[in-house]
Image (cartoon, grey):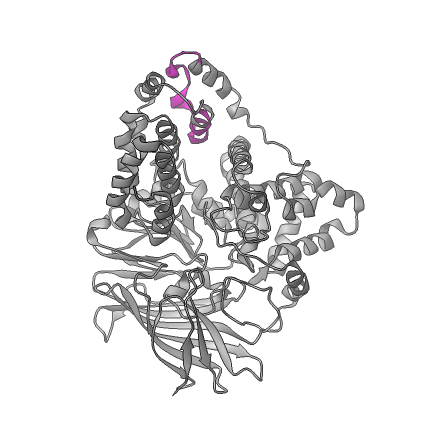
Amino acid sequence: MLRRTLLGSALAAPIIAAAAPAFARRADPLAPLPLDRSTHARPEIARVTHVSLDLVADFDAKRLRGTARLNIVARPDAEQIVLDSDGLVIHAVRAGRRPTRFELGSRDEELGSALTIQLNGQRTIEIDYESAENASALQWLTPEQTASGKQFLFSQGQAILNRSWIPTQDSPGIRQTYDARIVVPDGLKAVMSAEMLTPNGRHAREGGRAFRFRMPQPIPPYLIAIAIGDLEHRAVGPRTGVYAEPSVVERGAYECADMERMMDVAESLYGPYRWGRYDVLILPPSFPYGGMENPRLTFLTPTFLAGDRSLVSLVAHELAHSWSGNLVTNAVWEDGWLNEGFTSYIEGRIGEALFGVEHARMAEALSWADIQTALGAVPADGQRLHWVGEVSANDNSSAITYDKGALFLRTIEGAIGRERLDQYLRSYFDRHAFQPMTTQAFLADFRDHVVRGDAALEERLKLDEWAFEPGIPSNAVEPVASGFDDIPGYVAHFVSGGPPAAAPWEAWNTMQRQRYLQTLPRELPAERLDALQRAFALNDIGNNEVLFDWLMLAMANRYQPAVPSVERFLTSMGRGKFVRPLYRALMGQGEWGQAIARPLYARARAGYHPIVQTAVDRIVTPA
């Protein structure tokens, strides 16, 4: 996923260390897993290995209802299995084909409820159920909220939200295969993070059309994903294509034209793509993230549709997750950098191969600046790659999980050479394919295969300091991008009163424009902001990354002419990366900003995903 927050909680390091060797074996389906405090499950006793869903999408009730059939491995003496549930309505449970007893525990605000089911000696269970009311993983859109004017549904499972629509063990270390039959109203199409077996659907006995899916590779349960809407598909390569609503699909295919080349680059570096096809689904604007790396079908925000392919690093990032995250997965969310830091590094390598070295250096320089900002804003525990203590998602910064993680790998690359690191990473993905991973297990593996007792190399790399200590170790090197060399001069010229048009704005790429806006003084008088607006028409610029940087600067200075642009921006999309900081900036401007933020949020809230609503509810406090 691009730029997201994850669930954080305590984790006992000795338990991880003890479990690490099991990841290399994985012959035992009940091999030990590290303690995951984000689940009620007891996978050491009984573990879900396969989920089979037969569900009907009820758009009137805004629920998915039907049956989940679970295959289980368990110890011989196991009497029950513990699943995760958050608001699920359970109608009946069978072990084998006979009714069995079950109990829903009290609800924890973060974890939901434990669903404990008696096995009665069986290793399959069937659960008749409905998804939760206002399920946190599901957003049901009205026709007015879509481009096609038809209703739409999509899910967002990461980190632990799929328990609101699937009764299973919702932990990233418990890998599961799945299949599904999904019944949808006539005129709509279902897609999932799985192989589509019935592209056009079939007439369903319940009415509407039934679509069938199969995911034979074991995946962490947060990657089970569904979307239903008026969708069309456009191929952009032999293995790649774009799903979107009819009025969006051609734009999407244009922006994603390089996907097949991206796959070729990634495979040449890190081994074969193991998921069959790679399609993307461009969702309506309320999708809360930049992208979500659901296997075979990445979910994407429409905010990357700039019209000039300038924001396709988002696609490269989500594709890279096909190796780091989907193939080898963090076993617990405290180690989310193993997904996101690795992926950000691979994204950079794909971008460098396709768009040149200078493109990669500029991206690295922007991420370095983000890291420096984060180090000044988050507590020490939130600056570590491996989270410790009671670090919450609100304390952690994506600049640490994503950018510090990628910087760690680039630092290793600088110490041992790119060729050697590539050889190791390819071997790492091969040896640990379809397995969970922890920070301690990764470091042990790297030491076994690369360091090999070389004390001087160990000292040079500072592996433990990178993984477990706050801040940035002394062996990090600030990236230098020649494409940014002239920008300080243009900034200084503007600050001294010169016209902004002196800067070669039209010749700059997105990252250069971002760098210029990000390095302008945070306090500017209205006349200087007027000059920027007249020169570059920033209030109406179509690139959402650049527009966001402008609006953050404008709101920091209470620049009234940008308020209509802020209102359009915040009511036309729901991407949390943009939404949260802008509301935070407005609320920080006293009565002026709060008078804008509160009524604006009242109008926009219904169009945001529950994930974003929860976050902004904490920011936009009542008067």
Q: Based on the picture, tell me whether residue 505 belongs to the magenta stretch.
A: yes
Count how many numbered circles sit on residues in the image: 0
Examine the structure image and report whether residue 49 is included in the region drawn in magenta: no
Give 85 or 416, whichever is nearer the viewer. 85
Asked whether residue 548 appears in the rendered view, the answer is yes
For the view shown, which residue lies furthest in the top direction? 497
| Foreground residue among 463 and 582 | 582
**Percent x, y for residue 420?**
68, 45
The answer to whether residue 194 of the structure is visible from this angle is no
Rendered location of residue 107, percent (x, y): 41, 67
| Residue 212 left/right relative to 457 | left
Q: Residue at x 48, y 85 (%)?
A: 122
Please report the residue visible at 59 percent of the width from the left and 58 percent of the height from the top. 11
Magenta: predominant secondary structure element? Answer: helix
Q: Quadrant of residue 204?
A: bottom left
The residue lying toward the viewer, choosing from 472 and 122, is: 472
Q: Which residues are magenta?
A: 496-516
Residue 334 in the image: x percent, y percent? 56, 54
Is 553 left or right of 175, judged from the image as shown? left
Going by the image, does 47 lie left or right of 618?
right
Residue 546: percent from the left, percent from the top? Answer: 38, 31
Quadrant in which the C terminus appears = top left
Vertical order, 28 against 399 (above or below): below
